[in-house]
Image: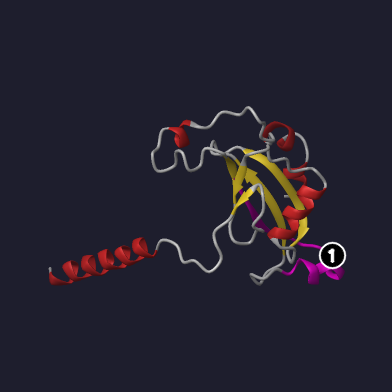
């Protein structure tokens, strides 16, 4: 996987860094749930664990928190589901925040000024990333209604 994502023809064909003049996708602009809240978003970033088979002397550093041996790869995609960045080959024990820090320090990952990426809580709260607030439980109302619907559906089925 390391060679596929990091080498031509995949990387040169499918990975394009966002540019300052890129248009906002119509999926964002024409949906009142998203516009104007995500008008400066250029995409989403996340790490992905891909199973790996390193030499036995390196296996301990590739052991991840999920309990298997892997590479941690950092990917960015835009709202058109196109890759805009890929960094592969990190040990499974490396965190998403570490991969992001390295990508920014080597100037590989370029986020245009005034724009940001959506990220999960594994990333640092910093300029260029929009991460959830720590300690906040989101979507509680939706989860509560979903369980009520499920219980009601079950009761209705049981009566027939």
Out of 116 and 1, give the one closest to the viewer: 116
Q: Residue at x 84, y 65 (%)?
A: 55
10 Å crowding of disc 1: few (<14), some (14-19), many (20+): few
Q: For the C terminus, which image quadrant?
A: bottom left
Is disc 1 placed on a helix, strand or loop?
A: loop
Residue at 70% in and 59% down? 97
Q: Residue 149, located in which quarter of the rendered image?
A: bottom left
Q: Which residue is mark 1?
A: 55
Q: Can residue 48 be found in the magenta stretch?
A: yes
Query: Where does the image place residue 102, in percent across and percent down from the top left?
Result: 79, 53
Residue 67 placement, left or right of 9: left
Residue 67 % position (x, y): 66, 72
Relative image position of residue 4 (x, y in whole percent): 73, 44
Query: Taking 116 as reference, is 124 above or below it?
Result: below
Point 68% across, 34% down: residue: 16
Which residue occupies the foreground of this view, 121 or 71? 121
Q: Is residue 123 magenta?
A: no
**Residue lying farthest left?**
160
Where 51 sits versus 77, above or below?
below
Q: Give the quarter of the image for residue 111.
A: top right
Is residue 145 found left or right of 16 in the rendered image? Answer: left
Q: Is residue 68 above or below residue 28?
A: below
Magenta stretch in the rendered image = 44-63
On screen, residue 52 versus residue 123, left or right, reads right
């Amino acid at each position: 996987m390391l060679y596929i994502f990091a080498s031509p023809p995949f990387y040169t064909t499918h990975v394009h860094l966002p540019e300052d003049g890129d248009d906002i996708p119509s999926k964002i602009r024409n949906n009142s749930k998203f516009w104007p809240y995500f008008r400066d978003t250029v995409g989403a970033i996340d790490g992905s664990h891909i199973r790996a088979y390193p030499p036995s002397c390196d296996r301990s550093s590739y052991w991840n928190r999920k309990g298997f041996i892997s590479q941690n790869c950092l990917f960015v995609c835009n709202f058109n589901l196109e890759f805009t960045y890929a960094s592969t080959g990190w040990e499974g024990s490396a965190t998403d925040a570490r991969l992001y820090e390295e990508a920014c320090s080597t100037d590989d990952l370029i986020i245009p000024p005034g724009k940001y990426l959506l990220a999960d809580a594994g990333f640092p709260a910093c300029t260029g990333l929009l991460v959830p607030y720590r300690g906040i439980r989101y979507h509680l109302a939706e989860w509560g209604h979903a369980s009520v619907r499920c219980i009601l559906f079950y009761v209705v089925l049981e009566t027939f």
